Image (spheres, rainbow, N blue to C red):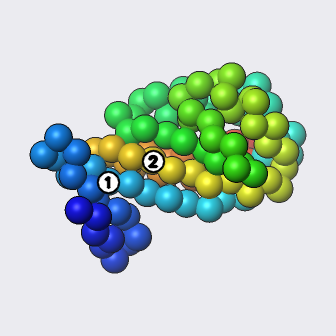
Amino acid sequence: MDERDRTGESMTQQDGEPQAECVSEVELRNPSGLHTRPAATFVDRASKFRAEVLLLKDGREANGKSILDLLALGAEKGAHLTLITRGPDAAAAAEALRGMLETGFDET
């Protein structure tokens, strides 16, 4: 069963437990793109959540908890990414990770 609440979060059943899914479209604002330092920061933050984390760019999918996957996206400043989080803490993960992407990892 797939239901959407008023926040746009999808709730699905997996192994008898509700699993949230959050999907966000974001623009990468980091001046140097998703290079090694911000990718490592993203992976570190993503790994603190139980939720599955995916980033999509131009039809390619990357595991948000794998630095090699993120670097392989070749995401430059201004790239449009889809952030997908799935799991019990999907909403918190989406909020934290979306904020990092949208603020440019505090790099200027």
Residue 59 screen position, x and y as percent: 70, 50
Q: Residue at x 75, y 51 (%)?
A: 58
Residue receiving disc 1: 20
Q: Earlier in the sequence, mark 2 or mark 1?
A: 1
Q: Which mark is residue 60?
A: none
Residue type at the position of mark 2: Thr
**6 relative to 16 in the view: left or right:** right
Q: Residue at x 38, y 39 (%)?
A: 51
Q: Which mark is residue 85?
A: 2
Q: Say which of 4 and 93 sits in front.
A: 4
Residue type at the position of mark 1: Ala
- Quarter of the image for residue 48 reads top left
Which quarter of the figure is the N terminus placed in? bottom left
Q: Residue at x 79, y 42 (%)?
A: 75
Q: Residue at x 62, y 54 (%)?
A: 82
Secondary structure category for the residue under label 1? strand
Secondary structure category for the residue under label 2? strand
